[in-house]
Amino acid sequence: VLGRILRDRQETILAANAYRDASRLDPTSREAFRAYVFTLNEAGMPYLASQTADQRLDLFSQEERREIAHAAAGTTVNLDARRQVSIIVSQRDDVLTVPTA
């Protein structure tokens, strides 16, 4: 419930944390795990979403897996022919963070 409320309020990182906690409390919850992955993707962390989804591929359709993988591949932005910037995401046990520098 908390994850849905936070997601509706556009607080996706907090929502992802809530869904992660819910999936840890009930590892059999298909809904919590899927919501965690999709919320990570919405929060701008598609690589982490993809890595997380890989842990339980049976919960995702082939189309959903392709969309998640495509989003992760799209995190690399070509600035020019010599330079690429990748979004790097770190995860601590208590809070998901995105480096700012």
Image: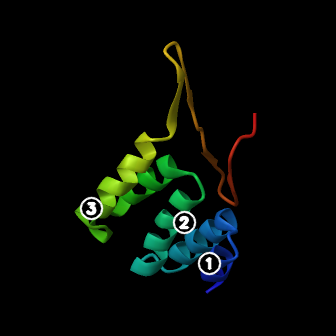
**Residue 8 spot, x, y in % from top left:** 64, 78
> Is label 2 in a helix, a strand or a loop?
helix
> In the figure, 86 relative to 21: above or below?
above
Left or right, residue 15 beside residue 31: right
Q: Quadrant of residue 95?
A: bottom right
Furthest toward the right, the residue is 101
Amino acid bearing label 3:
Glu
Graded by Cα atoms within 10 Å as few (under 14), some (14 to 19) or many (20 or more), the crowding at tag 1 reads: many
Please state, as top left, top right, bottom left or bottom right, where the N terminus lies in the image.
bottom right
Amino acid bearing label 2:
Thr
Marks 2 and 3 sit apart, C-alpha to C-alpha, by 17 Å
> Is label 3 in a helix, a strand or a loop?
helix
The residue tagged 1 is 3
Disc 1, disc 3: CB below 8 Å?
no
**Residue 10 spot, x, y in % from top left:** 68, 70
**Residue 44 spot, x, y in % from top left:** 58, 52
Graded by Cα atoms within 10 Å as few (under 14), some (14 to 19) or many (20 or more), the crowding at tag 3 reads: few
* x 52%, y 12%: residue: 82
Residue 63, numbered label: 3
Can residue 56 be spotted in the picture? yes
The residue tagged 2 is 39
Graded by Cα atoms within 10 Å as few (under 14), some (14 to 19) or many (20 or more), the crowding at tag 2 reads: many
Can residue 29 be spotted in the picture? no
Disc 2, disc 3: CB below 8 Å?
no
Disc 2, disc 1: CB below 8 Å?
yes
**Residue 61 spot, x, y in % from top left:** 26, 67
Amino acid bearing label 1:
Gly
> Is label 1 in a helix, a strand or a loop?
helix
Residue 92, numbered label: none
